[in-house]
Image: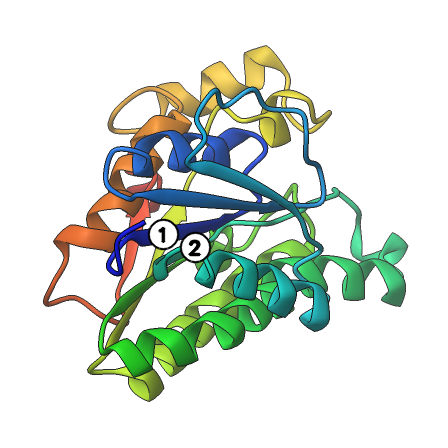
């Protein structure tokens, strides 16, 4: 291997937006590392894609995985995508569930960024893209206050990291709206009729695809050289409603 091979790390990479990001970044990076609690479920058919069984809440496991990636190539990009959601009312939301969702969706992003940032700063370049949600901007009637709170926290994390890690590292955020992922299609929150009604009220009149979010993530990783601390909504215009 050459001394200047570049790697991207994608968390929550086994399905949905994370998988689409891995597929997209394979064109731009020498190696792509997938951090996920679910591994071995994807046939990437590409020796440049590496899977690591990692719980992003675990600093030691994350540090070990990052070190393994750095032994192969310089980590030039991190996409903090791991996230979970379970619909629950405030009355039924217990502290353990709050901690679980905030742990993965917000603490996990901090843990991985903290492990990756020193190498980026030392090399003088890098990009971090945090995946949030429009639920963090407008709240969520279906996902629960723990979910929208975690996603709102990602905005603050993004801006704080951008200030602390610049000028060497750019830190930006994408906030998807409804996207055709297993988190959406396998949930009991939306019927087909409800999704159709929601989509019809959007300016673009359809639900988004993981690939459309991945294209924006790829732009923030490599093409947005004068952007940091920014939140880009990828939502078909839902914030206009």
Between residues 144 and 74, which one lies in front from this camera angle?
74
Q: Which mark is residue 72?
A: 2
Q: Quadrant of residue 86?
A: top right
How far apart in space, not on screen, are marks 2 and 1 (Cα)?
8 Å
The relative height of residue 146 versus residue 48 in the rendered view (above or below) is below
Between residues 187 and 126, which one lies in front from this camera angle?
126
Q: Quadrant of residue 63?
A: bottom right
Q: Secondary structure at mark 1?
A: strand
Q: Are marks 2 and 1 in contact (CB under 8 Å)?
A: yes
Q: Which mark is residue 86?
A: none
Residue at the spot 55% in from the left edge and 59% down from the top edge: 68
Q: Callout 2: 10 Å neighbours few (<14), some, many (20+)?
A: some
Between residues 115 and 239, which one lies in front from this camera angle?
115
Residue at the spot 51% in from the left edge and 51% down from the top edge: 135
Query: Would residue 87 appear left or right of 122 to someone viewing this image?
Result: right
Residue at the spot 68% in from the left edge and 72% down from the top edge: 59
Asked whether the viewer can see residue 149, the reply is no
Asked whether the viewer can see residue 200, the reply is yes
Between residues 61 and 203, which one lies in front from this camera angle?
61
Residue on which the image places disc 1 = 7
Q: Tell which residue pokes out farthest to the front in this image.
A: 1
Q: Quadrant of residue 39?
A: top right
Q: Position of residue 107 (x, y in %)?
A: 63, 70
Q: Secondary structure at mark 2?
A: loop
């Amino acid at each position: 291997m050459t001394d200047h091979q570049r790697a991207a790390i994608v968390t929550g990479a086994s399905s949905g937006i994370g998988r689409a990001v891995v597929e997209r970044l394979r064109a731009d990076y020498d190696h792509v590392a997938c951090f996920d609690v679910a591994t071995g479920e994807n046939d990437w058919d590409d020796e440049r894609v590496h899977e690591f069984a990692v719980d992003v809440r675990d600093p030691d496991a994350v540090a070990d995985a990052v070190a393994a990636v750095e032994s192969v190539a310089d980590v030039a990009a991190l996409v903090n995508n791991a996230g979970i959601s379970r619909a629950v009312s405030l009355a039924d939301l217990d502290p353990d569930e709050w901690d679980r969702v905030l742990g993965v969706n917000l603490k996990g992003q901090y843990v991985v960024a903290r492990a990756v940032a020193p190498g980026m700063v030392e090399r003088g370049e890098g990009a971090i893209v945090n995946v949030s949600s429009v639920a963090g901007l407008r709240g969520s009637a279906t996902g629960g206050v723990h979910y929208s709170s975690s996603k709102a926290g990602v905005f603050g994390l993004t801006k704080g990291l951008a200030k602390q890690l610049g000028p060497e590292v750019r830190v930006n955020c994408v906030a998807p709206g409804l996207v055709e992922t297993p988190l959406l299609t396998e949930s009991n929150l939306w019927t087909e009729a409800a999704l159709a009604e929601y989509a019809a009220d959007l300016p673009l009149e359809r639900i988004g695809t993981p690939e459309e979010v991945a294209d924006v993530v790829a732009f923030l990783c490599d093409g947005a050289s004068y952007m940091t601390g920014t939140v880009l909504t990828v939502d078909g215009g839902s914030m206009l409603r």
